[in-house]
Amino acid sequence: QLQPVESGGGLVQAGGSLRLSCAASGRIFSRNTVGWYRRAPGKQREMVATITSGGMTNSADSVKGRFTISRDNAKNTVYLQMNSLKPEDTGVYYCAVLTVITYWGQGTQVTVSS
């Protein structure tokens, strides 16, 4: 079964940067859309950014201009570069591979202090 694994979370001050990585084995990962989602404290999970197998991207208005999603299919890895972080970006960030079944990772905590 496909199991995405996230890494790169941590504690950072407002205005700082982090890069999250999502890795998984197999062709399912490289052939499908992968997304980053987050769940802020007390809120529902929301889409942050997605990238298709061909590299087309989409992102939430709240992160446009600050976050960049990219992928390296040779490494079966998707990245989320997060710049100009704000306290409201705090939450658990999940990677998901979107097929007829959605495969979720365990999540990685991102905490932005003011």
Image: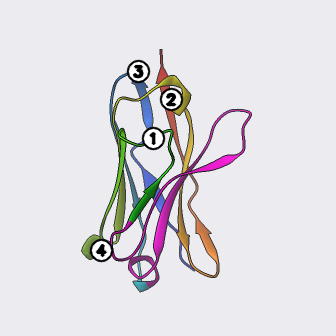
How far is disc 2 from disc 1 in space, using C-alphas? 16 Å
Which one is in front, 70 or 1?
Answer: 70
Cβ atoms under marks 2 and 3 closer than 8 Å: no
Question: Which tag, 2 or 1, sits closer to the chain's start?
Answer: 1
Nearer the observer: mark 2 or 3; the answer is: 3
The secondary element bearing badge 3 is classed as loop
Residue type beneath disc 3: Ala
Nearer the observer: mark 4 or 1; the answer is: 1
Residue matched to label 1: 63
Q: Position of residue 29 (x, y in %)?
A: 44, 77
Q: Of label 2 and label 3, which has the lower sequence position?
A: 3
Q: Residue 106: percent from the left, percent from the top?
A: 58, 55
Q: Is residue 60 magenta?
A: no
Tell me how far mark 1 sits from mark 3, CA to CA. Answer: 14 Å
Seen in the picture, residue 7 relative to 85 is either above or below; the reply is: below
- Disc 2 is placed on an element classified as strand
Which quadrant, please, contains the N terminus? Answer: bottom right
**What span is colored magenta in the figure?**
28-56
Residue at x 44%, y 40% (from the top left corner): 9
Marks 3 and 4 sit apart, C-alpha to C-alpha, by: 31 Å
Badge 3 crowding class, 10 Å Cα cut-off, few under 14, some 14 to 19, many 20 or more, is some
Q: Write the residue at 48% across / 19% down.
A: 113
Residue 14: numbered disc: 3
x 35%, y 23%: residue: 15
- The amino acid at mark 4 is Asn
Q: Was residue 32 drawn as part of the magenta stretch in this picture?
A: yes
Q: Residue at x 47, y 72 (%)?
A: 33
Residue indicated by mark 4: 73
The answer to the question of whether label 1 and label 3 lie on touching residues, with beta carbons closer than 8 A, is no
Q: Nearer the viewer, mark 1 or mark 3?
A: 1
| Residue 111 marker | 2
